[in-house]
Image (spheres, rainbow, N blue to C red):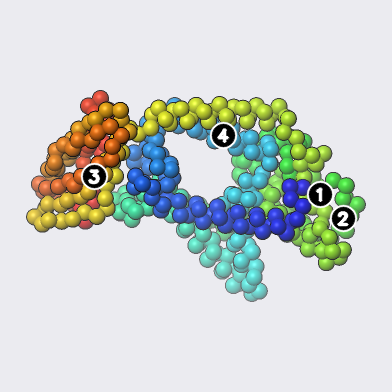
Amino acid sequence: MMIANSVLRGKIYRLLQFIVVVCALIIPFIKTSNGNSLFRFDVSTLQLYAFNTVVSFASFFSAFIAILLFTFLFVFTTQLLGRVWCGWLCPQSFFSIRIESYSKKIKNKTMRKVAAVLLAFVFALVLTLNWMMYFVSPYDFISSLKSSSTMVTIGVVLFLFIFVDFVLVRFKWCKYVCPYSKFQVVMTDDDTLYVGMIPGKEKECIDCKACIRVCPTHIDPRKNPDADCIYCETCVTACNQVFQKKDHHEGILGYVWGKGNKFNFKRPNLIVTFSVSIVLFIILIYSIISTSEPFIIKVDDNVKSLGNGVYTVKVEMKSNLEKAVRVHFSNPDNVAEVSPAGVRVFIKEKVESTLTINTLKEIPNGKVKIQAVYDRKKDPIVFEVNLK
């Protein structure tokens, strides 16, 4: 077993789940020193904001290597720990378990079903908004929805999908639909970690079937191992409760390292996937360093109106270049004049400047595009200033 004390393991299990969920919910709102989200992929610019670094995925190579690395790490984790992702970190399992456990506390059957639907609605709405904010800045989220019917459609479809899943499907998804469940069958071996009967304790089973009754995927955890098991430990908790009342000791179910219940890292499949993951990680880091954003512009959200269609906004420019450059500002749509026309930024320097935007005509949506050219050989940086 991974941890002898199942009570402690259960507390760690629940605490880790809540920490991961809270982190997932707040990460898009955390700003780094360059003004971007701590981690977010911006679909409008095809840039990944990660821990104060801006990575452009206009290069297919970097995106391809990142996808390969993620795939191999996922395979490696499954080969070593089985479906530990499903029970410990998967949002599908986490929220499905909460819907069932919270609604079951209500004795009235009708009210229990109503509570389950309401919880499904709230969780689906939160997940939909949160996932969309990993692709659109949460600080521009409302304005982006107002200006893009496509985003609204995507959000509605995503919400309905998650809501129906939480109301009607839940753990049936894990057992019958989830592709990861099917891939697990071919990715695991006789040494992979699983949840089930601890070897040598088969004769201690009193056939109370408590583990079967509480299992969300409706399997028999005593039959080792079962590909439909999601490692949620519900059966382990139920078994422990039965044996602690009966004999004052832990139950006969727990984490088991394969058929021999012995950790074995010297397995060809693990060595290959781990080695490939290391190589891909090195290639990705090199690609990010060599293609990371050379020039970053942060726009202040506070826009001041001077009247008569004239506005000022502060911008911060950070250069990662090995040469001094002059940044030229303009409006590509010819609906406004921008001054100063150029700002000097030296090697590895951070500069703050105030731009004056003089609108030449009425701006219907209140947004003006600003184009910043720092190198004629590179694509200009284009950003929007919200004048409303």
Q: Read off the residue under disc 4.
A: 71
* Residue 66 appears left or right of 364: right
The residue at which mark 2 appears reads as: 205
- Amino acid type for the residue under numbered disc 3: Glu
On screen, residue 306 above or below 333: below
Label 1 vs 3, first from the N-terminus: 1
Residue denoted by label 1: 197
Mark number, residue 352: 3
The residue most toward the bottom is 108
Mark 3 and mark 4 lie on one chain; the one further toward the N terminus is 4
- Kind of residue at disc 4: Thr
For marks 2 and 4 on the same chain, the one whose residue lies earlier in the sequence: 4
The local secondary structure at tag 3 comes to strand
Q: Going 42% across and 30% down the picture, which residue do you hit?
A: 289
Q: Secondary structure at mark 2?
A: loop
Which corner quadrant holds the C terminus?
bottom left
